[in-house]
Image: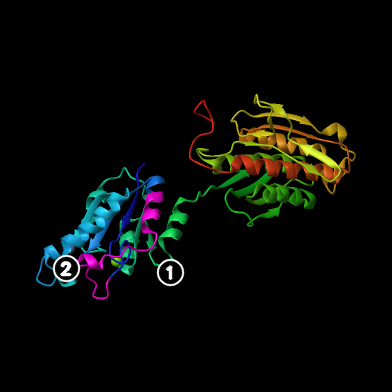
Amino acid sequence: MKKYLFIDRDGTLVAEPSDFQVDSTDKVVFEPFVIPALLKLADAGFSFVMVSNQDGLGTDSFPLDTFTKPHELIVNTLESQGITFEQILICPHKPEDHCSCRKPNLGLVMAYLKDTSWDRENSYFIGDRETDVSMGQNMGIKSIRYDRDTEGWQKICEDLTCPHRVATVKRATSETQIEITVDLDHQGQSHFETGMGFFDHMLDQIATHGGISIKAYVKGDLNVDEHHSIEDTGIALGQAILKALGDKRGIGRFGFVLPMDEVYAEVFSENLNDDGITVALDISGRPHVEFDLDAVFTRDYIGVMPVQMVGHFFESLAVALGLTLHMKVTKGNAHHQVEALFKAFGRALRQALKVSGKELPSSKGKL
Ligand SMILES: [Mg+2]
Ligand SMILES: [Zn+2]
């Protein structure tokens, strides 16, 4: 679906002169970073529409020919750099004319409003005045109040092009009630309430080393035992990450890993590549797990968490997320063994989730 940036001209694309009229070419001054920002935004899939009030255009106070030259300079300069506007919409009236096309009235954009094929959710109105903000609201899209110093083009560009891979999964059965939210692009907003201190600590390893935020609220039948809570948390976490990944474009897909203290945990070594690179974790869409874990654990429990559940947790997560996952851990202190596995998983996940570029990392064209 097409997404639009409706953009004001004066005070937003070019500086607004003190007399509010850009009526000669020497009054044309572009706003800082507007060109590189618009190029990146075009690259991110936005189409542009200019929407401008030009008070009294065509009257004695603002003759058309004094408008045209500087306007063409603006448009031609942008165009020469690769920035084009699908439409340039201008209201030539004064406030006292009470026209229907002066922002924030909707006359200029009526054709867009009648067209239901574009993406309202991801389109914006950008302008430096309160009327621009109202215009966006009247159109039913979000507004951005442009401000050179605090909300300039570099920031707008960053905000609109950075990925927002966030998802929440709620899962309720007779055994557990779980709500998990993940944010794959922002760290430091994690929170854990699973009723099992050690398990909270382990989920925190995934978040911290994965470079993501996880909020996990788990109410399980701990009066029976820990099994359902840990298993279902794994399922819900896998579902939440999968949902947040969206179309998976640009992700690293593969992850590797990691020695820790005396224990060596790795997501091991399946030779998928001819050049000898070993693969630990693959967001493949084909769940498959190879574990070499249980035999070497030196204790049955850490805190209230049965170490048997470690493998089961990762298996549940891998199936829900569509993960090919290989893990093994060497002998050692059981707390370290388990922690090393969660850390290693987090580190491998970090690489696999990281976005660089826009391509789908699969020759099959599907993940
Ligand atoms: Mg303006
Ligand atoms: Zn008008």
Q: Nearer the viewer, residue 46 or 171?
A: 46
- Nearest to N terminus: mark 1 or mark 2: 2
Q: Which residue is mark 2?
A: 98
Q: Nearer the viewer, residue 256 or 281?
A: 256
As helix, strand or loop, the secondary structure at mark 2 comes to: loop
- Which quadrant of the view contains residue 333? top right
Residue 153 in sight in this render = yes
Total number of numbered discs in the rendering: 2
User: Does residue 264 appear to the left or right of 344 in the view shown?
Assistant: right
Asked if residue 109 lies in the magenta stretch, the reply is no
Mark 2 beta carbon near ligand 2 (under 8 Å): no
Q: Which quarter of the image is occupied by the C terminus?
A: top right
Q: Amino acid at mark 2?
A: His
Relative vertical location of residue 315 with respect to residue 123 in this rendering, above or below: above
User: Does residue 112 appear to the left or right of 59 in the view shown?
Assistant: right
- Which residue is rendered at x = 73% and y = 49% of the image? 205
